[in-house]
């Protein structure tokens, strides 16, 4: 390849990989799988080795990690959180071993490569004081409060030392990911593509309560630095960290040769799908810490370790049919039904095809031989069509709703087809299931089977019909006895007392989730105010965008929506949001809480601040008005004193609210 062609290809790969990195690190929304990314990165590395004078200044090979936005405070890592060089063959492992043997006799440790988000944890005098993301390896972000929601992270060490920093991998277990995706699909939200991106998105939530709900976990795989203790080998450090209460790498056998290490790498690969979490390879490291110092590092990677990456498991099968499901908001979703195959340890026979554009792009036809894999080893996906049947024809989504027979529409700038018939049976079913769900009206006992039975017997057509049900009609349903009926009607009565925000969420307004419903009802505390809310006022709500504001206005302008709300209110459903604001004493003030207060819990203190017009933040900055500190206050108190921010006791805080200081 001449210099001109090489330059063109290098620029093309550089631009493409930088875009992929942005989508992954900044947007948490990758558009390419890891293996394809690795192969393109390898291609760029080879070209740059052959033409070093053509390396671009923004080449992704010239930096350790990726960019992040500045949502959280920056943290400079005293010990660089570097990345590892990837290898993809045994030949490359032997080459790695030869380089090591030139310097020292190798003893290796082999560990599963957890597919998650790398973080640093810092402890002073045995207490967790800060947790941060890797970022670009040199500067990360402070996510201490979110990391504290992970139960496997010790807040206090068993044998305190003056200072200790460890590195670990935060991940989302497969079971937790499956539950999260199911909820996102039920709410017709865009689901996370894989557990790693779900973990990254969860760890960077502004609200740590959301992080806590995501059930993240962590494995600690490296001791970054420590004061007062010394070690000879890496395996000794992991033993020590386990004794300190950390959940360390699931296995780290010591291998006396590269052959032993390669054997262990293959053992891990065979057990790959037995783990309750994703791994994308195995890491081989020199065990002796002194040898590591001698071996050193390049500007990008340590010379004493490499990551062996496993290729994704893909299998061929035959596409039998494409089923169309109609969602809560009328969206038609195609699903591939194929000859069952075993992937990642489980049998699969279905995969979502998303929309007509996806099907057209991959030219997927009924009868095709298709290639299937599991995205993140969880969600089956069709990669491509390998071959068409002789009599195959291009597939087109139906022009009429398969549930109600009404014409479907494709809205401007939307990929999905939608049934807009408000009485479409499939949409009605999902609307009512959502309305009764725990986060909405929380009607206990009204599950999908009960909803379907009530619809089939023509007892309900809208959520409002639930409140006019006849007890005899309910008891006549199969497997519904007197006690079940009593429980259902008691739950219906309780649901009438719910605050307006739950009702709004239960309505299933497009693009409006639970938190957005709460924000709406903080501004508009009655259904009448909300119905007449204007676009410019709604978009001014913090956290709202144009699409969300348009969805609210469009929904309440629909005659069928107005009719539904009128019936719900006639049935006794609460049309207002309780006033939580006691005063505006703390208006414009931002509080940070630290330590254990004498009588108030964190939750109670936060509620008091918000009820009196103030805001609660998780981190201290120049914008902080007060720090409310209790016993065992940590680094936040130190930072407040450094910045000259007033520190309040609980008594002073309560007096401030009472006396309107």
Image (tube, rainbow, N blue to C red):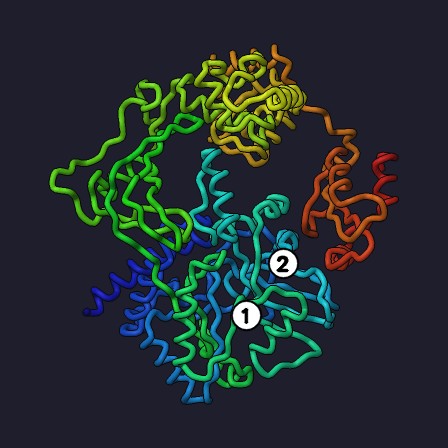
Snapshot quadrant of residue 576? top right
Q: Secondary structure at mark 1?
A: loop
Q: Quadrant of residue 616?
A: top right
Against 331, residue 236 (above or below) is: below
Q: Is residue 529 left or right of residue 251?
A: right
At mark 2, the secondary structure is loop
Q: Classify mark 2: residues with Cα within 10 Å, few (<14), some (14-19) or many (20+).
A: some
> Which numbered circle lies on residue 65?
none
Pick whichever of labels 1 and 2 is earlier in the sequence: 1
Residue drawn at (73%, 71%) of the image: 159
Q: Are marks 1 and 2 in contact (CB under 8 Å)?
A: no
Q: Indicate left or right for 116 with 493 as reference.
A: left
Q: Which image quadrant is residue 609 in?
A: top right
State whether residue 468 appears in this view. Answer: no
Give the class, few, some or many, for how many residues have Cα within 10 Å of label 1's Cα (few <14, many ≥20). Answer: some
Along the line of sight, which residue is nearer the eye, 280 or 342? 342
Q: Position of residue 48 (x, y in %)?
A: 31, 70
Question: Quadrant of the image for the N terminus?
Answer: bottom left
Vertical arrangement, residue 480 with respect to residue 111, above or below: above
Q: Residue at x 39, y 70 (%)?
A: 266
| Tag 2 residue | 152
Taking the view exactly as shown, the residue that stands out farthest to the left is: 390
Could you tell me how many numbered marks the image carries? Answer: 2
The image position of residue 584, as x and y in percent, is 77, 31
Q: Position of residue 224 (x, y in %)?
A: 59, 72
Residue 335 in the image: state x and y as whole percent: 33, 37
Which residue shows up at 51% across the image and 27% down it?
Answer: 433
Which residue in the protein does label 1 denote? 80
In the rendered view, tell whether residue 517 sits above or below residue 284.
above
């Amino acid at each position: 390849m001449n210099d001109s062609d090489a330059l063109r290809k290098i620029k093309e790969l550089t631009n493409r990989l930088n875009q992929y990195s942005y989508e992954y690190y900044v947007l948490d929304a990758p558009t390419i799988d890891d293996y394809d990314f690795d192969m393109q990165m390898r291609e760029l590395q080879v070209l740059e080795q052959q033409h070093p004078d053509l390396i671009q200044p923004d080449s992704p090979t010239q930096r350790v990690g990726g960019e992040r936005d500045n949502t959280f405070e920056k943290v400079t890592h005293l010990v660089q959180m570097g990345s590892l060089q990837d290898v993809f063959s045994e030949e490359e492992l032997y080459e790695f071993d030869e380089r090591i043997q030139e310097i020292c006799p190798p003893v290796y440790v082999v560990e599963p490569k957890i597919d998650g988000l790398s973080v640093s944890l810092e402890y002073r005098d045995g207490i967790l004081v800060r947790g941060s993301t890797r970022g670009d390896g040199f500067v990360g972000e402070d996510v201490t409060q979110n990391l504290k929601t992970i139960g496997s992270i010790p807040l206090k060490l068993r044998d305190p030392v003056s200072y200790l920093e460890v590195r670990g991998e935060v991940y989302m277990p497969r079971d937790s990911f499956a539950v999260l995706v199911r909820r996102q699909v039920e709410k017709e939200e865009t689901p996370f593509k894989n557990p790693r991106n779900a973990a990254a998105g969860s760890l960077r939530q502004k609200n740590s309560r959301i992080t806590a709900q995501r059930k993240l976990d962590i494995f600690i795989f490296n001791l970054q630095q420590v004061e007062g203790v010394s070690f000879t080998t890496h395996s000794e450090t992991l033993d020590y960290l386990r004794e300190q209460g950390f959940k360390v790498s699931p296995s780290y056998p010591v291998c006396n040769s590269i052959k032993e290490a390669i054997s262990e790498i293959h053992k891990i690969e065979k057990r790959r799908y037995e783990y309750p979490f994703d791994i994308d390879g195995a890491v081989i490291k020199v065990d002796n810490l002194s040898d590591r110092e001698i071996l050193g590092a390049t500007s990008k990677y340590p010379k004493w370790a490499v990551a062996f990456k496993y290729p994704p498991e893909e299998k061929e099968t035959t596409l039998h049919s494409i089923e169309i499901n109609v969602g809560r908001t009328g969206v038609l979703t195609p699903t591939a039904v194929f000859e069952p195959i075993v992937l990642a340890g489980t049998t699969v026979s279905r995969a979502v095809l998303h929309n007509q554009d996806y099907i057209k792009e991959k030219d997927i036809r009924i009868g095709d031989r298709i290639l299937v894999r599991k995205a993140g080893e969880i969600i089956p996906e069709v990669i491509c069509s390998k071959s068409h049947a002789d009599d195959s024809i291009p597939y087109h989504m139906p022009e009429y709703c398969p549930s109600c027979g009404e014409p479907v529409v494709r809205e401007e700038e939307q990929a999905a087809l939608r049934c807009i018939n408000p009485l479409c049976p499939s949409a009605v079913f999902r609307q009512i299931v959502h309305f009764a769900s725990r986060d909405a009206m929380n009607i206990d006992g009204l599950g999908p089977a009960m909803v379907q039975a009530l619809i089939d017997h023509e007892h309900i057509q809208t959520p409002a019909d639930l409140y006019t049900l006849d007890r005899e009609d309910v008891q006549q349903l199969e497997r519904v006895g007197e006690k079940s009926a009593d429980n259902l009607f008691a739950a219906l009565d309780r649901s009438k007392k719910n605050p307006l925000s739950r009702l709004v969420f239960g309505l299933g307004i497009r693009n409006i989730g639970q938190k957005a419903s709460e924000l709406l009802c903080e501004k508009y505390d009655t259904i009448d105010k909300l119905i007449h809310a204007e676009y410019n006022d709604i978009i001014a709500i913090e956290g709202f965008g144009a699409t969300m504001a348009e969805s609210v206005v469009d929904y309440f302008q629909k005659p069928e929506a107005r009719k539904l709300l009128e019936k719900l209110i006639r049935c006794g459903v609460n049309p207002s949001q309780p006033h939580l604001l006691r005063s505006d004493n703390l208006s414009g003030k931002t509080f940070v809480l630290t330590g254990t207060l004498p009588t108030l819990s964190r939750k109670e203190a936060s509620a008091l601040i918000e009820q009196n017009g103030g805001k609660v933040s998780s981190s201290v900055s120049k914008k902080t008005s007060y720090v409310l500190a209790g016993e065992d206050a940590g680094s936040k108190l130190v930072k407040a004193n450094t910045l000259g921010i007033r520190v309040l006791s609980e008594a002073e805080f309560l007096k401030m609210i009472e006396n309107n200081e």
